[in-house]
Image (spheres, rainbow, N blue to C red):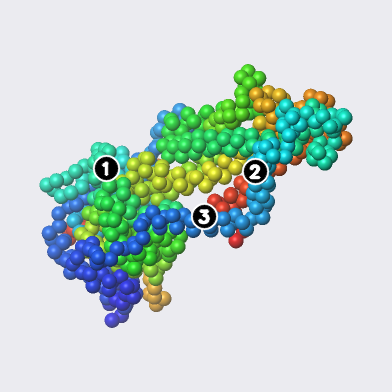
Amino acid sequence: MTNEQMGKWQTLFHPSDPCPRFPDPYLEFRMTHTDPLVTVEHLQKYYPVNQGLFAQTRHYIHAVDDLSFQIGRGESLGLVGESGCGKTTTGKLLVKLIDPTKGHIYLGSNGSQTDIAPLKGAAVKQFRRRVQMIFQDPYESMNPRLTIYDTVAEPLVVQGIGTVIEREERVAEMLALVGLTPPASFLFRFPHELSGGQRQRVAIARALVVQPKFVVADEPTSMLDVSIRTGVMHLMSNLARRLDVTYLYITHDLAVARYMCHRIAVMYLGKMVELAETEELLQHPQHPYTKALLASVPVPDPSIKRQAAEIKGGIPTPINPPAYCRFYERCLIATARCRDDAHPPLADKGNGHSVACYAV
Amino acid sequence: MTDSISTTQSLSRESGVELDLLAREERITPVPLWRVRVKLWWRSARQNAAIFADNKIGLLGLAIILLFGVMALAHPILMATVWDARTYDPITGYSFDELRQPAPPSARHLLGTDPLGRDVLSQLMYSTRNEFILGLLAALITVTIATTIGATTAYFGGVYDMIFMRVADLIIMTPAISLLIVMCALFNPDLPQLAVVIGILSGFGGTTIIIKSQALSIRVKPFIEAAKVAGGGHRHIIMTHILPNLLPFSFLYMMFGVTAAIFSEATLSFFGLLNVRMSWGIMIFTAQAAGYLLSGVEYWWLLIPAGASITLLCSAFYLVGRALDEVVNPRLRKR
């Protein structure tokens, strides 16, 4: 089979990989029987830009602007976009590390939804058992003065789960589960004695030790060596199935998103511009920004000539953006309507494919 | 796709059983947790001691501190055994054997006598204990206040932070020595009181700002966010994550604090402002009051022992502080 026959986007991984994503036998079942675990409605996060001590704040950075989406139970949704587009802010909003300016985040399916914004005190603690986060930097996300045991057991300790012996066993089980075997030899080491991949496995164990249902993974593999990356991704998708975990997988790497995610959402300057199932999005991108993003992926084959990205200009500032389409200045297919109307809403174009664009 | 990571195999082997992968009968940790922790603590202490020992200047400082410590401990023993209280008492003694006071060093009085006929060596050794008490007490109060305020202001920020930082600015703006002189003239404090005052001034002042800046750099680390996501409250985060990373710096600034406290005490004693019966500053004050300050070469034993002791002990604590800086601040290490 030649590269042309395999199609443009098959080359995201090496052409000899027929199916880069780890095969999921339950995928069909999940995608048809899914009910939402996380529902986000009109989520906004504005950061004020201060101009002085007594000056009134007139400018806001629109980090996340009017985001609405659902994540199904057992699904993993990829959040893709360039630096500064609001991916990480969205992730932090979902785990309640920061509070939204406006909008709602509901956890749970249709029958028993809870809005996480007004949670306080003990309710937040309870919420932390259901939602966890895996951080990007395995070198900074662990206290250098705590042992691996203390790091992984921390959620159990602050939640008051189990006795000391139960916690020890639970931590050792988790370490074995993330592939740090034998666990006893890792329990009382310090983070600096571990490699990057091992640390990230510890971070995964720590996030999953309270058996959460929803995990925000903020670029968990971007700081890792390429050789270790696949192993960690493999582990994460394995654990997701085994422990029934739903991921919001934040990444800027389309190959990683393709490997890990059932659906991919593309963000641009705080707005979601396209949302579709992984292969659908990669094979038939519709939004001009997604097309440009895909065109920018390097192809590991010198015989393939890539097309130039269909985009112009640079990223505009997210401070007080205009009301019309955020992508207007950089878009090659923009019409007068794109300039006159408000930012296009995410419209369903069939086949589970939603695009925020007037021109397609 | 071939995957060489062993995880896959171990996972598939234990398929189906959720979170129950290890046989229950074998305990994961054969020894109790606290014993492991003591061992770890001991190991890191040994490593840090090795780094400290690599620094010859720090060892020199430590040796000087130990020397003064021996002096302080030896004084009561000498008074009880060899030295006769009538002759050698640092405050009320009088050397009847000398014809003229102050007498130069001799076999009887190794560092001579002062203008009032008292043994200088005895005074020097007697004062050492007070200097230690004052320096360490003041430094302890300083770092306790500074660490508490530094950690909490860095963590909470906002109005709380602003209040304490403006207080610190005020204290830094005020010249400490002149403030202490006025205060001593009004209230005539004794040593522990002075230690408290110095501790409070320095604790709410410059040291707070230094420690807060350290705490700020810890506060933005992702492990603080990770602790929040784990469900940790404010107290948990401050006690488990900020303070343990801050304490080495607190200890370091405690060393520098000792230096500052001893120096302030010497200055105040020299002006005769303290309600203290004997100290290194008072020894110089006595020489000055009797008019010997300007003939320092001829009557060197009146000035040099006390002056050198102040300089040596202050610099010793400073040197130890510098060596500790290397221990707690890996970037400064030569290797």
Which residue is denoted by mark 3 in the rendering? B45
Q: Are marks 2 and 1 in contact (CB under 8 Å)?
A: no
Q: Residues within 10 Å of mark 3 (few under 14, many from 20)?
A: few
Please name the residue shown 72% across and 28% down the image: B91
Query: Foreground: A204 or B50?
Result: B50
Image coords of residue B144 (percent x, y): 50, 37
Query: Please, which residue is most extreme toward the bottom here?
Result: A1
Q: Nearer the viewer, mark 3 or mark 2?
A: 2
Secondary structure beneath dot 2 equals helix
Q: Are marks 3 and 2 on the same chain?
A: yes
Q: Are marks 3 and 2 in contact (CB under 8 Å)?
A: no
Q: CA distance from mark 3 to mark 2?
A: 23 Å
Specify the label residue A111 is tagged with.
none
Q: Quadrant of the N terminus of chain A?
A: bottom left
Query: Foreground: A359 or B308?
Result: B308
Looking at the rendering, which quadrant does residue B137 occupy? top right
Q: Residues within 10 Å of mark 1 (few under 14, many from 20)?
A: some
Query: Foreground: A188 or A72?
Result: A188
Q: Chain of mark 2?
A: B
Q: Chain of mark 3?
A: B
Secondary structure beneath dot 1 equals helix
Can the viewer see residue B308 in this picture?
Answer: yes
Q: Chain of mark 1?
A: A
Image coords of residue B94 (percent x, y): 78, 28
Specify the label residue A124 is tagged with.
1
Which residue is denoted by mark 2 in the rendering? B69
Tell whether A58 sits left or right of A76. Answer: right
Q: Quadrant of the C terminus of chain A?
A: bottom left
Looking at the rendering, which quadrant does residue B193 occupy? top right
The relative height of residue B334 versus residue A97 in the rendered view (above or below) is below
